[in-house]
Amino acid sequence: MSDDYGPSRLQPCGAKYVPAHPDNIHAGVNKPKVLVWHTPEEPVDATETTPELFSRKIFGEDGMQRLASTSYYISGGAGTFGDGDLYQCVREHECAIANGVTTRGFLDAAGLSDLNGKTYPAGTDPAISLNCQSLSVELEGFAREIHKTMVRGGEQWRAAVEWCESRAWKYDIPLTLERAGVSHAQLSVWRTDPGKLDRAQIIRDAIALRLTERFDGALEELEDGMAAGFVKLAPGEADPGDPNRVWLVGLHSKRKMFGERSDLANALGIPNNVKIIKKRTLDRLYQVTPVK
């Protein structure tokens, strides 16, 4: 069992630890600032090949050694243990070789580069390898179809939401798309994963999970007068009558729940043409209304 990811509601025995080969671990100490999402390009079936692949030296068809690993892996098929099981391949204080940023594109005939250059995610230091500033997760499946095989509410989806919320909580990573929902495609000109996976919805589900699980019974009810003209909604739920209007219930808490307040709109997937207004003295109560 993993020392980093102990028993949880969806992982009653904690993450299964399948250690990566030492060659597949980057030197240095990891201080996670972002969460990065991958697909390993393997079928969703009863054979979970990725943890085993990273546990040994990897060689390409040309005989050259390839260095690669991941912090975590979530099964999508029946697998050895079941759908939605979590595996850890690299301990969190170690640096998985997964998220190196491709800062230069392919060289063209004139020797020009940076045509497809990538930049470091928000909140990270470009002077330090991103492998030592991130946690990565491989979602069993293919980039081209993960949005079809990893359906919302399924075991793999629920495990991903729990992983996202718990790692963000542990390392005080804001639950925003820019920090907790980084795609591998954002980091490399050679990658497209995790395809059309709705990472914004995973973030919204992680916010709802935090409100209901970590602060069970602590939610503040909106006053009738305060909610006049508004529909009372669950945390983060969009008003069906006006998708630009959202209530986010606040809590008395000294710990950051969502990161910087300016990131709330991004975390909830709210369009840029809305304005966030603090309405009460509660730490985290916001009314989101369209900008006139």
Image: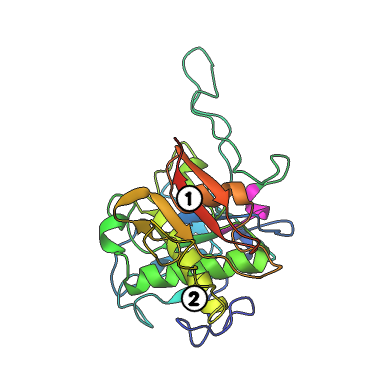
Query: In front here: 251 or 270?
Result: 251
Tell me the quarter of the picture where residue 101 sits.
Answer: top right
Residue 49 place in picture, x, y as percent: 39, 68
Disc 2 marks which residue?
212
Q: CA distance from mark 2 to mark 1?
A: 20 Å
Q: Quadrant of the C terminus?
A: top left
Label 2 Cα neighbours within 10 Å, binned few <14 / some 14-19 / many ≥20? some
The tag on residue 161 is none
Q: Horizontally, is 141 left or right of 137 in the view?
A: left
Q: Secondary structure at mark 2?
A: helix
Residue 140 place in picture, x, y as percent: 37, 64
Magenta-highlighted residues: 130-135
Q: Quadrant of the N terminus?
A: bottom right
Q: Is residue 13 magenta?
A: no
Which residue extends farthest top?
Answer: 110
Residue 137 visible to an observer of this rendering:
yes
Disc 1 marks which residue?
288
The residue that appears at 35% across and 74% down in the rendered structure is 155
| Amino acid of disc 2 | Thr
Reply above or below: 26 against 244. below
Residue 39 visible to an observer of this rendering:
no
| Amino acid of disc 1 | Val
Tell me the quarter of the picture where residue 114 sits.
Answer: top right
Q: Horizontally, is 198 left or right of 104 in the view?
A: left
